Image: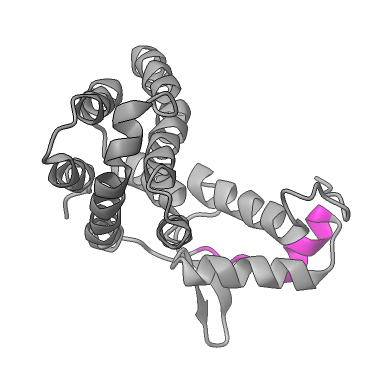
Amino acid sequence: MRLSPSPPVVQSLREQIREHLVEGIISGRWQPGERIVERRIAVELHVSQTPVREALRELEALRLIESVPNKGVRVRELSASDLEEIYPVRAGLEQIAAELAAPVLAFDSAPLVPHVTALYTADREGDGEAQVRHTVAFHRELVRASGNSVLLHTWESLGIEVWTALSIRWLGTVQQSYAEEHEAVLEAFRSRDPGIGSLVKEHVLGCAPRA
């Protein structure tokens, strides 16, 4: 695989490498406890070690990898408890976002609709990748609708897509119907449910893996 040294403006070389590494961890290319060798990744992707090192630092900040003295960098051995920790933080952020976004989404819920539609298809076909992608996209649009850039940046810094995928693929955290649960949230916005913040909070907490 070769990454372009002059990537599109929307995604830097470091971000491309980060996505490559994340996908490798989620897909199982690198198993928990396995080393990720910086120089080997740089050679494989035909890039210098600097952006690889930067990408690895980001993944360490997300707690996906860890530096072990005299052993280098390796994929963390994550338990249900590790994965579970992020959900109360995320739930609190999304509760605030839902309350701020409520007037906006009551007036125009169009940003959420395509993802609910796509989730019905993903549920029907058992497409786990699409379930993760559209679940995260639905929640990103919800947070974006709050109009608070700090809130959105903080939410995105949690690496929601990565943790959602890991919860589903590593621990088998599967809901009965992703589409129906998200349609219920959508309808709550449309009906101007006064308890929308608490509803969204409980929705997120209900997705958490159980230790």
Q: In the rendered image, which quarter is residue 178 located in?
A: top left
Residue in the picture at 32% in, 43% down: 101
Q: Is residue 114 magenta?
A: no
Q: x%, y% of residue 81?
A: 23, 61
Instruction: Say which quadrant the N terminus sits in.
Output: top right
Colour basis: one colour
Q: How many marks?
A: 0
Q: In the rendered image, which quarter is residue 190 located in?
A: top left
Look at the picture and state if 152 lies above or below 202.
Answer: below
Look at the picture and state if 157 lies above or below 126.
Answer: below
Q: In the rendered image, which quarter is residue 13 located in?
A: bottom right
Q: Which residues are magenta?
A: 34-45
Q: x%, y% of residue 149?
A: 47, 57
Q: Is residue 29 left or right of residue 134?
A: right
Q: Is residue 196 left or right of residue 119?
A: left
Look at the picture and state if 137 lies above or below 61.
Answer: above
Residue in the picture at 38% in, 46% down: 143
Q: Is residue 37 visible?
A: no
Residue in the picture at 44% in, 55% down: 152
Q: Is residue 205 visible?
A: yes
> As rendered, which of 101 and 4 lies closer to the eye?
101
> As rendered, which of 199 and 189 lies closer to the eye?
189
Q: x%, y% of residue 109?
A: 36, 26
User: Magenta stretch: dominant SS?
Assistant: helix
| View extreme (bottom): residue | 69
Q: x%, y% of residue 183?
A: 26, 23
Q: Is residue 21 left or right of residue 139?
A: right
Instruction: Say which quadrant the C terminus sits in.
Output: bottom left
